[in-house]
Every structure is written in C-alpha cells, then in structure tokens.
Amino acid sequence: MIKKIAEQLVNLTVKQVTELATLLKKKYGIEPSTSVKVENIENTSLQKEKISEKEEKSVFNIILKSSGNSKLSVVKLVKEITGKGLKESKGIVDNIPSILKESINKKEAEDLKNKFEKIGAEVELK
C-alpha cells in the first residue's frame, strides 16, 4: 500500500502537488517542508521523460520520401541496400514514399539515412 501511494505521489503533476500541499495545510495543518520545491518535482518529470526516450525505439523502418536531384544515384543505392534488381529498385524510387528496409537497429538506420542524405535523397526513420 505504501509503495502504491509513493508511486502515485511521484507521478503527480506540479499543479496536483500544489493542490495537495494546500489541502494538507488547510485540512490537517501540515505544512510541506521547504526543501521540497517545485523545481525538484519538475526535475523528476524531466528525468522520467529522458528515461522514456531511452526506452523508446530501437528498431526502425527506413522510408524513402524523396529522391532529390540525383535519381540514378538513389536507384543504385536502393539496389545496393535491398539486394533487388535495377528494375525493381527503380520501381521503389518511382513509387515514393517507399519502405526501403524494415526492422533494423538504430545505428544501421542512421548510417543508411546518412548515405541517402549525402546523395540528396530524403528518408525518414520510423
């Protein structure tokens, strides 16, 4: 029960903490310690956001959004990456947006994105 209450307290918004402090003071005569500041609560919220960002995506799909000015170079790179023939690769580039690769790790996705951006293409990681 105590752990559940603690978890609820940690997940309160700044507004809810202020309301709780007011309620405790008025109804029970309890004044919150001055060492607990809104800044600390906001920092806790920011830390939670950072943790959730770290836990976010580790697997990506690469989607070709635009071939840019150098369509031939993009077709060649698509051919190299997908292992498909020249005609199939051209079809992928002609039918934008197209998924180039699915379920790859973040490092590989970033590397491929950089390759495409160097030749003027626009890709998206999802």
Image: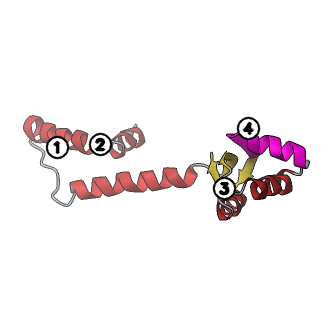
Identify which amino acid the numbered label 4 is placed on.
Asn
Among the two numbered marks 3 and 4 on one chain, the one whose residue lies closer to the N terminus: 3
Among the two numbered marks 1 and 2 on one chain, the one whose residue lies closer to the N terminus: 2
Residue 89's spot in the image, x, y percent? 83, 46
Question: Residue 84: in sight, yes or no?
Answer: no
Residue 81 left/right relative to 18: right
Residue 48 left/right relative to 65: left
In this view, the residue farthest toward the top is: 27
Mark 4, residue position: 95
- How many residues crowd mark 1 within 10 Å: few (<14), some (14–19), many (20+)? some
3D distance between C-alphas at marks 3 and 2 = 49 Å
3D distance between C-alphas at marks 4 and 1 = 58 Å
Look at the numbered disc 3 and give the secondary structure of its residue. loop
Q: Which mark is residue 21?
A: 1
Among the two numbered marks 3 and 2 on one chain, the one whose residue lies closer to the N terminus: 2
Which part of the image, by quadrant, shows the N terminus? top left
Residue beneath the point at 36% across and 39% down = 8
3D distance between C-alphas at marks 2 and 4 = 46 Å
Contact flag, marks 1 and 2 (Cβ < 8 Å) = no
Residue beneath the point at 49% across and 54% down = 51
3D distance between C-alphas at marks 1 and 3 = 61 Å
Q: Which residues are magenta?
A: 86-101
3D distance between C-alphas at marks 3 and 4 = 16 Å
Identify which amino acid the numbered label 1 is placed on.
Ala
In this view, the residue farthest toward the front is: 69
Among the two numbered marks 2 and 4 on one chain, the one whose residue lies closer to the N terminus: 2
